[in-house]
Structures are given as structure tokens and as C-alpha cells.
């Protein structure tokens, strides 16, 4: 039931783990680890009624991990040296060419000890049946199955996301910020954006990166970025170029454009995840001149234009106020907000980049999105009519 990550395959360990196994076998820099395969999960749910999703989730959440799995986990962790680890989902329907399931299932960083790892594995299994995951799947499908990856935790100085191009003449898109990756993929920080063009030139937009996520013992803490570092570039052009070359190698190994999560630790670049690009981001917009005073600008996140009623949402307590066709205006979105993306007409966020999970899901749902609009929740007003252009990155109040 425990498979070395080097030997992982998608049919027994899920798409995410299977891809990391391919990359490891190709000699690419992936943190070492192992996988709790589908077999362990299936042994837990084989006697449960999978038609009652809430009941299944509750049973998994409270049931102890089987003794044989617990013993195997302990031995696998000992073989790694019992370091802090990342515990991450690898579902059968995750990271496929048809759907990314970006951020829909659980992942945990800085986990230490067999007991805590077992709890995290169980939480990953249960997340198959969370309301957001069920809503994301959106339609009846084959019985969902979950494997779980356990890898060495990396204390990244800089992390980010990279989209490799579908056309060799197009640019590689890279986003980067200080600290651990959830700040970027979760959209809680607006990252630096880099474009590495086919001719080797690099263009960049440096953001005001106010917070970072780091490990402190077995906890994750959000810290303020020192003022002097907020508007400093997280990587230089040479590093961006090296990342693009790494992305090209990964895309060649995997046979198509890839959405890649990466981290830099002590000057070394590591690959944390790679999956097919399900929905490419909009092209970089031309410089907008003479924009009306009522127009706000941000990062183009998902193509299209829509006009609708602005709905200011600062947290789950405001979800019930959202009506079909509203334009969601919020500080940022996390995966729990996925059900809203099925009913809203568009999305405006105050932070986040084009490669964040929210942006990916918006593109999969073909919802226009503009990201990183400073103070959008105070500059726009509830119940007013606004127009957003997710291709140009503009928001205009009527």
C-alpha cells in the first residue's frame, strides 16, 4: 500500500504522484518521498455506502488509520529520516488534461511524526467528499479514488508557478513570491510576473508583495515582508531563464504544455508539481492609455467581458448574498469559494496572479476574471453595475 515516489504510476497512485514519478525517473529535481496508494483508501471505504457522501466523509474523518497502514507509514517516514513532510492529495480525477481540480482537495505542509501524517492522510481521503470537491466535479462520475503523496517539506526562500507555452514561439509565464507556495496558488499575495520569450528576452512586472508564508516548527505562519523587500524582484532574469529551460524539459518529458509548481531552496530549484494546462491564461495586454477615471486595472485572469451587479464578498458569511450573474468582488478566493464560481458572471480580486488556483478554475468555467485590483472591495460598491474585461484586465463602474 506504500509505493516509493520514484515508482509511482497514475493508475495506482493518481495523476499528481504518477507525474512526479515520471519526472524522478527522468532525473529531474523532485523532493523524495512515497505514496499511500489507492489500495489503502479502497480498503477504508469498501464497506461504505458511497451514495451518502456526507456520511462517507464523516466516517473517514473519525476512523483511525488501519494498523498495517500506520506501521507502513512509520517505516517509510523512518527511511526518509523522519523530517517535516508535505502531505498532498493525488486523486484519480486530479491533474488530468480535462480538469485540474486545482486546490479542490487537501494538502498539508510541515507535518511531522507518524500520528500527524496519518491524520493528514485521512483528511486528504475525506476531502474527496467535501462540498467544494463535489461541486467542482459537478456531474456524476466514476467512484472517486484518492492516493496521498508524502514528501520532504522544503523551506522555500522563493516559490512560484510556471506555465509552459503551447507554441514554441510563445512565452513561458512565471509567477514568483517570497516564502512557501500556498501564498501564490491560494491568491493571497500578488506575485511578481515574468515572461521569458522565445528569443531569450525576459520582461517582468514586480509586485508589492506584503506577506509571506513560512514554516515555524510544525506550524505555518504568515509574516510581513520587510518594507525594503516588498518591491524587490524575487528572482533575476537569469533565474527566470533557467526556470523556463527546466519547464521546457518537463514539457518534453510529459508530452505537452505544463502548469508547474516550483520552489528555490539554498539556490537549488525543485519541482513540486506538474500537470497539463487545462485553460491557458489571456495574453499579456497592450498598455492601456487614456483609460476613463472610473476604470480600475489589474491582471487579466480569464478571457471575456461581462456586465453585472457587483457583489462585495469578504468571506463565507457573505456567500448567501451572491445571486446568479453577480460579479464577485473579493479580497481573494480560496478553494472553499469554488461553488460561487458556478453561478457568478465574473470575478474581481484584490490580490492574486494569473496562475493561481482561482484563476485556473475561473478559466475552466469560462468566467471573466480580473485579479490584483488594489482595494477593489472598497473602491467598488455593492449592488452597482460594473463591467469587467478579463482579457484587458479592466473593471469599469457604470
Image: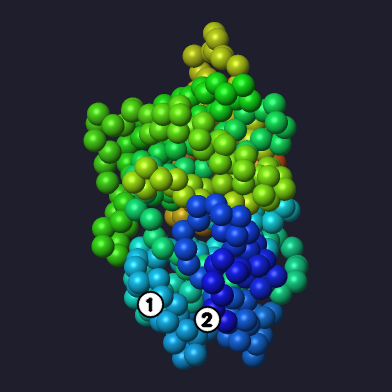
Seen in the picture, residue 374 relative to 6 is either above or below; the reply is above
The C terminus lies in which quarter of the figure? top right
Task: Pick the residue in front: 1 or 54.
Answer: 1
Residue at the farthest top position? 290
Q: Could you tell me which residue is drawn at 40 percent across and 71 percent down?
A: 80
Q: Could you tell me which residue is drawn at 46 percent across and 50 percent down?
A: 270
Taking the image as shown, residue 359 lies to the left or right of residue 211, namely right
Lower position in the chain sequence, tag 2 or tag 1: 2
Residue at the farthest front position? 27
Image position, residue 320 (x, y; %): 53, 54
Badge 2 element: helix
Q: Which disc number belongs to residue 60?
A: 2
Q: Nearer the viewer, mark 2 or mark 1?
A: 1
- When asked about the image quadrant of residue 6, the answer is bottom right
Taking the image as shown, residue 155 lies to the left or right of residue 371, namely left
Q: Could you tell me which residue is drawn at 55 percent across and 28 percent down?
A: 195
Q: Could you tell me which residue is drawn at 38 percent across and 77 percent down?
A: 78
Seen in the picture, residue 362 relative to 374 is either above or below; the reply is below
What is the distance, in whole Å, between disc 2 and disc 1 at their CAs?
Answer: 25 Å
Task: Pick the residue in front: 218 or 36.
Answer: 36
Q: Which disc number belongs to residue 78?
A: 1
Taking the image as shown, residue 200 lies to the left or right of residue 140, namely left
Colour scheme of the rendered structure: rainbow
- When asked about the image quadrant of residue 289, the answer is top right
Whether residue 311 appears in this view of the structure is: no
Whether residue 114 appears in this view of the structure is: yes
Seen in the picture, residue 258 relative to 82 is either above or below; the reply is above
Task: Pick the residue in front: 370 or 111.
Answer: 111
Image position, residue 338 (x, y; %): 58, 53
Count all numbered tags in the image, as a single digit.
2
Amino acid at each position: 500500500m506504500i509505493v516509493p515516489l520514484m515508482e509511482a504510476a497514475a493508475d495506482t497512485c493518481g495523476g499528481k504522484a504518477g507525474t512526479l514519478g515520471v519526472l524522478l525517473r527522468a532525473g529531474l529535481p523532485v523532493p523524495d518521498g512515497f505514496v499511500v496508494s489507492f489500495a489503502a483508501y479502497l480498503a477504508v471505504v469498501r464497506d461504505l455506502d458511497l451514495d451518502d457522501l456526507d456520511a462517507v466523509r464523516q466516517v473517514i474523518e473519525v476512523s483511525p488509520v488501519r494498523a498495517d497502514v500506520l506501521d507502513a507509514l512509520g517505516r517509510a517516514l523512518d527511511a526518509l529520516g523522519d523530517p517535516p513532510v508535505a502531505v498532498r492529495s493525488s486523486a484519480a480525477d486530479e491533474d488530468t488534461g480535462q480538469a485540474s481540480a486545482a486546490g479542490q482537495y487537501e494538502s498539508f505542509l510541515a507535518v511531522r511524526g507518524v500520528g500527524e501524517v496519518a491524520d493528514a492522510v485521512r483528511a486528504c481521503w475525506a476531502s474527496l467528499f467535501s462540498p467544494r470537491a463535489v461541486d467542482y466535479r459537478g456531474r456524476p462520475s466514476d467512484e472517486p479514488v484518492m492516493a496521498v503523496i508524502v514528501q520532504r517539506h522544503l523551506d522555500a526562500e522563493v516559490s512560484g508557478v510556471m506555465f509552459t507555452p503551447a507554441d514554441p514561439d510563445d512565452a513561458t509565464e512565471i509567477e514568483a513570491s517570497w516564502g512557501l507556495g500556498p501564498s501564490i496558488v491560494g491568491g493571497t499575495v500578488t506575485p511578481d510576473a515574468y515572461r521569458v520569450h522565445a528569443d531569450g528576452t525576459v520582461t517582468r512586472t514586480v509586485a508589492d508583495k506584503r506577506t509571506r508564508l513560512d514554516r515555524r516548527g510544525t506550524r505555518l505562519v504568515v509574516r510581513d515582508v520587510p518594507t525594503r523587500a516588498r518591491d524587490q524582484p524575487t528572482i533575476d532574469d537569469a533565474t527566470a531563464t533557467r526556470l523556463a529551460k527546466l519547464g521546457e524539459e518537463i514539457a518534453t518529458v510529459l508530452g505537452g504544455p505544463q502548469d508547474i509548481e516550483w520552489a528555490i531552496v539554498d539556490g537549488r530549484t525543485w519541482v513540486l508539481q506538474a500537470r497539463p494546462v487545462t485553460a491557458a491564461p489571456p495574453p499579456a495586454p497592450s498598455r492601456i492609455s487614456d483609460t476613463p477615471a472610473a476604470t480600475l486595472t489589474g491582471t487579466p485572469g480569464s478571457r471575456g467581458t461581462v456586465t453585472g451587479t457587483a457583489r462585495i464578498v469578504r468571506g463565507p458569511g457573505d456567500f448567501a448574498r451572491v445571486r446568479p450573474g453577480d460579479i464577485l468582488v473579493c479580497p481573494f478566493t480560496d478553494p472553499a469559494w469554488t461553488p460561487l464560481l458556478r453561478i457568478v458572471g465574473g470575478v474581481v480580486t484584490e490580490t492574486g496572479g494569473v496562475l493561481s488556483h482561482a484563476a485556473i478554475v475561473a478559466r475552466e468555467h469560462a468566467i471573466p476574471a480580473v485579479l490584483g485590483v488594489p482595494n477593489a472591495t472598497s473602491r467598488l460598491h455593492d449592488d452597482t453595475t460594473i463591467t469587467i474585461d478579463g482579457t484587458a484586465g479592466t473593471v469599469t463602474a457604470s
